[in-house]
Amino acid sequence: WETDKPREVAITVLPRFQDDAHAPASAKADFRRDVRLETTAPWVACGPNVVLTRGGKAFNVKIDPTRAGDVGEGPFVAEVLGYDDAKPGAGPLFRVPVTVVRPKPCVSGEVEVASKTYAAGEIRRVFATPPPGAASAVVKVRCAGVGDGAGLGRRLVHVATVQLAPQESYDTFAAHKRAWVHDGEETVYDVGAVVPGRTMEICVSQDWNSLEPAELAATVSFRPAGRPAGDVVLRGTRSIAPMALEAPDWAAAPTVAAPKLSLKRWRRPLRPASSAIVPCADVDRDAWPGDPAAPDGDARRADFPAYELRLDYAWTMPAGATDKAQLRFAGDELVYDAPTDGQHCVIRDALRGTVVGWRDARAHGDVAGLQAGRKYEATLTLRHEDAAFLETLRDSECWLDLALKDEVAVPVYGTRQAAYRNDNRTGKFKDVRLAPGDGKVAFAAPPAESALPKEAKEGDVLVGSASVCRSQTHAEGPSRRPAADLWYYVPPRSKNTKDKKAAPKKKNETEPLVVDAAAAGRARALLGDALSAGLDDAASVKLANATADAHVSKLKKEASTLEDAAFRALGAAVVAYDSSKARDVARAS
């Protein structure tokens, strides 16, 4: 726990019996111990007694870190000891270790490690807590010789840091650096990413092979992330992601907000093409021994096999990636406490059947030499003694993880409106200097579809990093470090629905002729009995259309020579037949 206040913690003690599976139930039921509790330090307190039975017992322990020691000192260690009250001279039945660390105070983003003389191989440990908003740290070590060796040479100095995070591997936030430090000079060690608010151990040591002692002093400097923790996620073509850019109050110098987002990897989900659950082939090696205490004829006496699930995947190598690939499965971050007993994967060329790569419970680098457009397949084997559990994993997907040939830049805008408009001319976010305590907001927008790999399809994910700030003066250590992971979920690809011009009519192509009784009557009225005699309705309408067009043409050409009465009569006959030609008649006049 990260706390500087007294706290009560519940401790549970559970007895374990020798050969527990075969221990008589009566012995377990009769188990009882009256336990006397003692603590080895005044800052740890608990009750005087507890009764322990087969089901275990919980009791509270109060820990007051403020009484353990001064700030910046430690670690302080104590124990809670449980003794059998019936055996006063016996040692403790159990021990509960308690460790308290009181980190050094952080002033303006820095923690000082006082100067000290280090002998060869001597290690000094100090503890500090990265302040809120910290993303990384550097350690500056200053060296001075001692006695006759002062100023005569250089020293190999080691710096190691570690932070423990819940459900994370020990080495997730650990770093070990070493470098030569010349007497009278200082060297900067970049120890990488840190977790704000979680105690960090910093170890400084002179190499074991050093000839002379050295006077070493160190300063731990934390660098701001520039934004709150959390990934930057973009979905589709119209989503945007606001990013709060902040310079923390403790920052020793102004920070330049300069967001830079890029997509670097391409992940594609794969579902198994086939699967099978079978007993492991080597019965002698891959079988669990039966229970020798079971009576003869009992099925529990027989050995029972372990099972393996085989999942077959297939894919075609896309052209937009490099020739290297990784296969990722759920639980890759677990090894010794993985949900399955074993894991192995073989990658083959689908056409030739030759093995091109493999991996076990942890990814061992990239499979190299893969050719674009070529088909590959992989078989993942998972082992477990429970076939029913393997059945739940039968259709598990894996992720084909590829490095993009060309990184895809993600645009960042200064306003929400500019992000939605993709205003690259005036709306792009411009670098801004943030004094400690200042803040800004930037907006990430999806990349242009033309920048994506041509073979990227719906369901694929592009992964990258987002760095949002750099130091104003490019001081020691990297001036720009990724502050968050960047995710882009590829939407369905565009179908190019842009409006197209209507195709011109062919020379002989005409509108379909619509004929009804009313149209036929108007046509005969225009043509007169002499012309319409002997024509059917369709022929009458067709001839009337041509006659009306001819009349309109005549009105336009002879408007100045026709008598007014004749002009009006001819125009009225055309309009009476087809009212849509009234405008043409009016223009002719």
Image: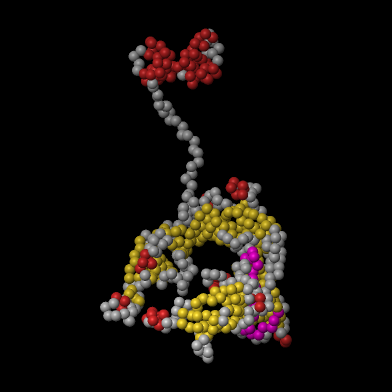
Q: Specify whether residue 426 is in view.
A: yes
- Quadrant including the N terminus: bottom right
- Quadrant including the C terminus: top right
Where residue 330 sits: x, y (%)? Answer: 45, 65
Where residue 404 sits: x, y (%)? Answer: 51, 59
Between 325 and 441, which is closer to the camera in this rendering? 441
Where residue 516 sits: x, y (%)? Answer: 38, 21
Q: Is residue 440 left or right of residue 498?
A: right
Span of residues in magenta: 115-135
Q: Is residue 184 above or below residue 538?
A: below
Q: Is residue 202 left or right of residue 344?
A: right
Q: Is residue 30 magenta?
A: no
Between 562 and 494, which is closer to the camera in this rendering? 494
Residue ranking furthest to the bottom: 89
Q: Is residue 414 above or below residue 400?
A: above
Q: Is residue 522 left or right of residue 251?
A: left
Q: Specify whether residue 160 is in view.
A: no
Q: Name the residue: 49% across, 77% down.
A: 57
Q: Is residue 134 magenta?
A: yes
Q: Name the residue: 63% across, 76% down.
A: 64
Q: Name the residue: 39% across, 22% down.
A: 515
Q: Name the residue: 52% across, 53% down.
A: 235
Q: Is residue 302 above or below residue 561?
A: below
Q: In the rendered image, which quarter is residue 387 located in?
A: bottom left
Q: In the rendered image, which quarter is residue 225 located in?
A: bottom right
Residue ranking furthest to the left: 297
Q: Is residue 452 above or below residue 29?
A: above
